[in-house]
């Protein structure tokens, strides 16, 4: 297109950066192709980890329809599974932010290109790009806000992030199919010292002199990613590593010292737990199953066979603790107490919590049956603190933190 | 230019994509279709029409200042630390800005007031590192220039 009025963003001459061009865009695009695919898969896994098909109390998107086609019974091993998948999901997402921003910057002239549509296909492709860009930003923004407990978005996080991901992914796959071959070709040709074959329209007709090389600009983007990674990744570990997560939530120092000093998702005060309900005289665990109901005091629970398990707490927000040494009664032993001797069934666990979306949570039979699944009474050699669920809490290997119900009041065994 | 892609295949692909996006979209819009639409479209508009122009103009300003002083090539020494610091602020502004102090402190039992200080310290370190690198390179260049100069005849 001829270029008479470079003062308008609709004219190619308006865009001056010599960095823009097929190589820069192609490299960033390929990084995002891999990165976002991993984000999507780990995101879907996180939804599966909630076992939404097991009980309505586990499912925040009950009208998902075919979008839940892939769901499966979440395993209990390896015991660090959710810690890994969700740590990757959130940390990688934060790390990719500079790449996403740079990619959007590199193609912004196309947003203003005239005519708005050259053909029906082109018009549809541009609408699809709105879903792509809007979807990407929507997913990153809701995710980043949610891990900081800043619930500004219009509605509950789970449906927004889940359905938003599918809208985004629909546009992402289309974009990837249409553009990946050209991006791969471009990178390959530029590597061999040839000119790019596609995407020449991104090259500015009248570039300003460079202040940085293309390679330097890529290092710059990578440096941004590295900085975010370095100040975030530590929140998946206890001890000195956590202190390196300088700006991320649950980074820095632990909330306390001693056996109960590790990270807390929701404190007892925040969950509205009253000391009067958890005292030795007041609290009774109500266990219901095939043969009826049993009520157990904490002292009685301590007289049942106690077992240990070293398991982490891994939160959907992407942070996790290292392994803690839990001690308590096996869930399958509790099931046996109420008549489920050989084949532990599912269980519905209810907390003393008055509010909070997971005050009731369901565990699947395979989780109940695992010998490491405990109703924990102690951690790291001491009684649980109120903030970690005193008098008793659930710990299940590989399960998301929200299913490790604290302040347990009632357990109902049976097929849900 | 690329030759026009196989039009039919592309149309079918787009139709398939819109159908899936629509299926998820009606569920996404759910109870608050206006709010969600505003967020979805607003995110794209806010980025493309506000955030990007803002940082592009700021960057051009820096380039121009250095250009006026005849040192355009030194732009990166300001651009890199400034952009990295802005990036951290963009990602963690709810915590840095103290927007969620009460909820964060109550829920996690962690202090919520350290983020601003830590961000400022990181920013200081980034700029200091950049300045140090600049001085080192300057010295290196000066030394090389002195070495290359022919010995002065007395």
Image (tube, coloured by chain):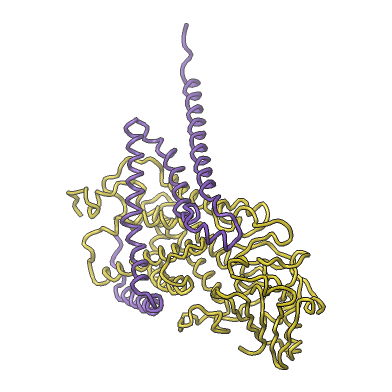
Visible residue check, residue A193: yes
Nearest the camera: A161 or A133? A161
Counting from the top left corner in percent of width and height, residue A3 is at 19, 50
At 46% from the left and 54% from the top, the residue drawn is B93
Counting from the top left corner in percent of width and height, residue A330 is at 75, 78
Q: Which chain is yellow?
A: A
Q: Residue furthest bottom?
A: A291
Q: Which chain is purple?
A: B
Q: Quadrant of residue A272?
A: bottom right
Q: Give the answer, above or below, for where A140 lies relative to A370.
A: above
Visible residue check, residue A84: no
Q: Quadrant of residue A319?
A: bottom right
Counting from the top left corner in percent of width and height, residue A264 is at 63, 63
Q: Give the answer, above or below, for where A218 lies relative to A288.
A: above
Q: Give the answer, above or below, for where B82 lies relative to A117.
A: above
Q: Quadrant of the N terminus of chain A?
A: bottom left
Counting from the top left corner in percent of width and height, residue A148 is at 51, 60
Q: Is residue A277 left or right of residue A95?
A: right
């Amino acid at each position: 297109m001829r270029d008479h009025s470079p003062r308008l963003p609709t004219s190619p001459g308006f865009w001056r950066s010599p960095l823009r061009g097929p190589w820069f865009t192609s490299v960033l695009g390929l990084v995002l192709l891999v990165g976002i695919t991993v984000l999507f898969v780990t995101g879907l896994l996180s939804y599966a980890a909630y076992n939404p098909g097991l009980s309505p109390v586990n499912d925040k998107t009950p009208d998902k329809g075919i979008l839940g086609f892939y769901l499966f019974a979440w395993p209990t091993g390896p015991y660090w599974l959710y810690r890994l998948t969700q740590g990757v999901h959130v940390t990688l997402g934060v790390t990719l932010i500079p790449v996403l921003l740079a990619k959007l910057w590199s193609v912004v002239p196309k947003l203003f290109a005239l005519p708005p549509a050259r053909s029906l296909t082109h018009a549809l492709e541009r609408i699809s790009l709105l879903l792509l860009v809007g979807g990407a930003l929507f997913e990153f923004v809701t995710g980043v806000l949610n891990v900081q407990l800043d619930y500004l978005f219009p509605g509950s996080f789970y449906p927004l992030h889940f359905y938003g991901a599918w809208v985004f992914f629909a546009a992402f796959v289309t974009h990837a199919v249409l553009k990946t071959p050209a991006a791969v070709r471009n990178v390959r040709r530029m590597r061999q010292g040839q000119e790019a074959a596609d995407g020449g329209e991104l090259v500015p007709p009248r570039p300003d002199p460079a202040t940085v090389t293309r390679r330097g600009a890529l290092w710059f983007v990578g440096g941004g990613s590295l900085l975010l990674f370095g100040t975030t990744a530590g929140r998946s570990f206890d001890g000195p590593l956590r202190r390196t997560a300088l700006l991320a939530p649950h980074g820095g120092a632990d909330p306390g010292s001693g056996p109960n000093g590790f990270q807390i998702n929701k404190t007892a005060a925040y969950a509205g737990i009253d000391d009067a309900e958890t005292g030795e005289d007041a609290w009774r665990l109500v266990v219901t199953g095939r043969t009826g109901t049993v009520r157990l005091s904490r002292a009685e629970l301590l007289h049942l066979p106690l077992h240990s398990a070293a398991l982490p707490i891994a939160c959907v927000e992407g942070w996790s603790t290292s392994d803690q040494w839990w001690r308590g009664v096996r869930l399958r032993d509790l099931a046996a107490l109420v008549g489920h001797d050989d084949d532990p069934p599912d269980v519905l666990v209810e907390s003393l919590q008055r509010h909070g979306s997971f005050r009731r949570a369901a565990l699947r039979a395979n989780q109940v049956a695992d010998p490491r699944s405990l109703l924990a009474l102690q951690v790291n050699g001491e009684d649980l603190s109120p903030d970690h669920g005193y008098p008793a809490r659930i710990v299940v290997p590989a399960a998301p933190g929200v299913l490790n119900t604290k302040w347990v009041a009632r357990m109902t065994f049976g097929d849900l | 230019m690329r030759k026009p892609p196989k039009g039919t295949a592309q149309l079918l692909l787009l139709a398939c994509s819109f159908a899936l996006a629509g299926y998820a979209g009606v569920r996404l819009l759910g109870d608050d279709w206006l709010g969600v639409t505003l967020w979805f479209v607003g995110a794209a508009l806010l980025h493309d029409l506000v955030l990007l122009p803002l940082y592009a103009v700021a960057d051009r300003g820096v380039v121009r200042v250095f250009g006026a002083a005849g040192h355009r090539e030194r732009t990166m020494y300001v651009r890199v630390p400034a952009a990295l610091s802005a990036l951290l602020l963009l990602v963690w502004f709810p915590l840095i800005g103290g927007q969620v102090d009460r909820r964060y402190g109550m829920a996690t039992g962690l202090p919520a007031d350290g983020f601003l200080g830590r961000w400022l310290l990181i920013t200081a370190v980034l700029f200091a590192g950049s300045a140090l690198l600049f001085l080192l390179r300057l010295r290196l260049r000066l030394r090389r220039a002195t070495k290359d100069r022919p010995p002065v005849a007395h």
